[in-house]
Image (cartoon, rainbow, N blue to C red):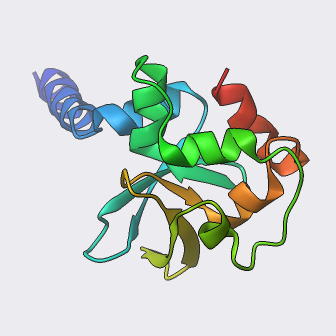
Amino acid sequence: MKSAFFAFAATMILGFNASAETPYGRECRFAGGIHWDVSVQTEFDTPLCLFGSAAIGSAELAQYKWGNGLSYSLKAFKNQTSPSNPSGMCDVVGAAYWTATDSDGKQWELCKFLDDSVIELKTLAAGVNAPANAKLVHALK
């Protein structure tokens, strides 16, 4: 009886934990990334998907995977075939520069586009051919 209770309790805890995952977070995980929330304007309002040191918005990745086309951030990334200086990069691609903070206190530099899509500044500046972005590029195939 005691073991049945513990099995039920474990199922409930694991079930609630799994159901708390958002569709965007789930799609990020399926693509091989790690879902990571950062705060731009309000607490944890911007979900990212991390592929090693590369980071893009989780929503943009999910929408792309679901066949809804490329966001402005993904278009800018796919067009970035050679590395550029990160300074002023957001302006060059028509995005706003934002800083964000995660739960560990780490600062993130993001480019935020008119469609509200985001990409981490150094990810964008390094471009699609950078070894640091290889996992992200693979996830976008």
Name which residue lies at 48% across and 22% down. 65
* x and y, in percent, of residue 119 in the image: 56, 56
* x and y, in percent, of residue 18 in the image: 28, 33
Relative height, residue 76 to residue 93 (above, below): above
From the viewer's side, name the closer residue of 93 and 62: 93
Name which residue lies at 74% across and 79% down. 87
Relative height, residue 103 to residue 29 (above, below): below
From the viewer's side, name the closer residue of 113 and 23: 113
Name which residue lies at 82% across and 57% down. 126
**124 sits left or right of 81 in the view:** left
Q: Quadrant of residue 120?
A: bottom right
| Number of numbered discs | 0
* x and y, in percent, of residue 63 in the image: 40, 29
**43 sits left or right of 48 in the view:** left
Relative height, residue 133 to residue 106 (above, below): above
Quadrant assignment for the N terminus: top left
* x and y, in percent, of residue 109 in the image: 58, 74
Name which residue lies at 55% across and 79% down. 106
Quadrant assignment for the C terminus: top right
